[in-house]
Image: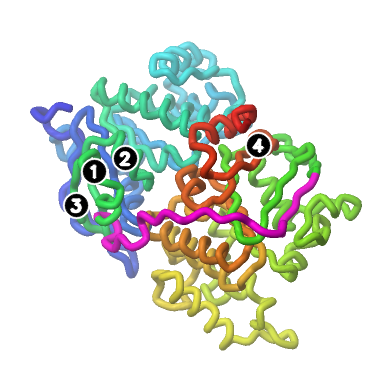
Amino acid sequence: MSTTAPPRLELRAISKRYPGCLANDRVDLSIQPGEIHAMLGENGAGKSTLMKIIYGVTRPDSGELFWDGRAVSVKDPAQARALGIGMVFQHFSLFETLTVAENIALALGAAAGTPRQLAPRIREVSQRYGMPLEPERLVHGLSIGERQRVEIVRCLMQDIRLLILDEPTSVLTPQEAEDLFAVLRRLAAEGCSILFISHKLAEVRALCERATVLRGGRVSGDCVPAQCSDLELARLMVGDAEGLEAQYPKAQGGEALLQVSGLHRRSADPFGVSFAGLDLEVRAGEIVGIAGVAGNGQDELLALLSGEQRLPRAQAEAIRIAGEAIAHLPPDARRARGQAFVPAERLGHGAVPEMSLADNALLTGFQHGLVRHGLVQRGKVRAFADAIIQRFGVKTPDAQAAARSLSGGNLQKFILGREILQQPRLLIAAHPTWGVDVGAAAVIHRALIALRDAGAAILVISEDLDELFQISDRIGALCSGRLSPLVETAATDPLAVGRWMAGQFDAAA
């Protein structure tokens, strides 16, 4: 990393205010040529707003931005790309029914050439950086790791000088993450600056040369991650370190509460995943974790377990709760039997954005004394919502605040708390801490362990192996609709589970 040249990117006193919120408060940031720089902070700290300002999506209210020592005003993403700034968002922006070359051609514009003309250059660039791509392949046939390659190669074909990566490893296997880090180190060695946003502190310590920490919209500190422990980084981010290093004892489950036996289901979606004889068991008093790269059947399995997709009555025995066949029953009937559900998508699936937190609490809690003789008991609804907010430390003015006004982490705490306070016998949780900061994740993990210790059966489906190893008692992986054997977490390791995520189930032996 060169320190004699001016910073590749420098922000001075950047501020951005939204109604009722100061998202960025006089933020300073400096990134050198060839530096891998981490941006850390809890949910709502202002990271996303700052990235949007750098990439031209949002204009700051005040402050200055310097590029190679020259003051610039980035008006839109097209100007950012012209400067040499590229960004890979957490949720990819690819058309699944188009080829790799067609997707890249759309991003680069007509001046760059047709997909056929771009194909040789795509092969050359992708192979040069150890991310080989076939330009003619349709995106829907690519793994999540390969789709991320498309996004990165698309940036590299634009003579990129600063690459912003938002939670880039949240959907990758451990092996794919290591491959990505090798690419990033090579890019940095060639002079490209990397701005790396992640909640995975071990990765930050291994990869990044410096880190800037945001808290409440302000810079709370700068550090060299390799010289800090995970706990020290977490303290910079959230202040209170309580529970951040918790090691939860493993438990042995009792009776089987959820039983999935010989589950057969052909997906009606041409890009969906089918099941052919899937077996799964979750016992009372245990947490079973299922890992897997997105798109390997998680959504289809969750829909069948929640009741959003039902099987014919003839196949009702394929899913049982406490021995009762329920595969043909709708969600409310399953909830009446003690099941609770935390979906993967917070807004629109877990909560209605425009509705208040109190009304969102009613949506799934209505069977627990909140409705009497067909009339909503408003006082009880408010008390229930207030109890969720207080117990789970949800940052919000009150229970009348709209769900969409909360940060992702706070809304996730509310949704999970809503389900846990119903004291379910069986909880199915999808990606419970996806994109959530370390403080909120610690609150969620403690709540899941407490529910387990109270005797509930818990199934957690997640792409975060660190999380699964921390809280799961047994673990397995889903790949192309097939489930690996479930083994005790203490008897395996992340590399083995990573192989299962790639379909190498013989490693479970």
Q: Is residue 450 above or below residue 266?
A: below
CA gap, disc 4 to disc 2?
Answer: 30 Å
- The tag earlier along the polypeptide, 1 or 4, is 1
The residue labelled by disc 2 is 204
CA gap, disc 3 to disc 2?
Answer: 15 Å
Residue 347 in the image: state x and y as whole percent. Answer: 54, 59
Question: Split into 4 quadrants, where in the image is the C terminus?
Answer: top right
Q: Amino acid at mark 4?
A: Ser
- The tag earlier along the polypeptide, 1 or 3, is 1
Camera-side residue of 146 and 297:
297
Residue 211, which numbered label?
1
CA gap, disc 1 to disc 4?
Answer: 38 Å
Which residue is painted at 66% across and 38% down in the image? 485
Q: Which residues are magenta?
A: 236-261
Which residue is painted at 61% across and 73% down in the image? 422
Residue 179 in the image: state x and y as whole percent. Answer: 42, 26
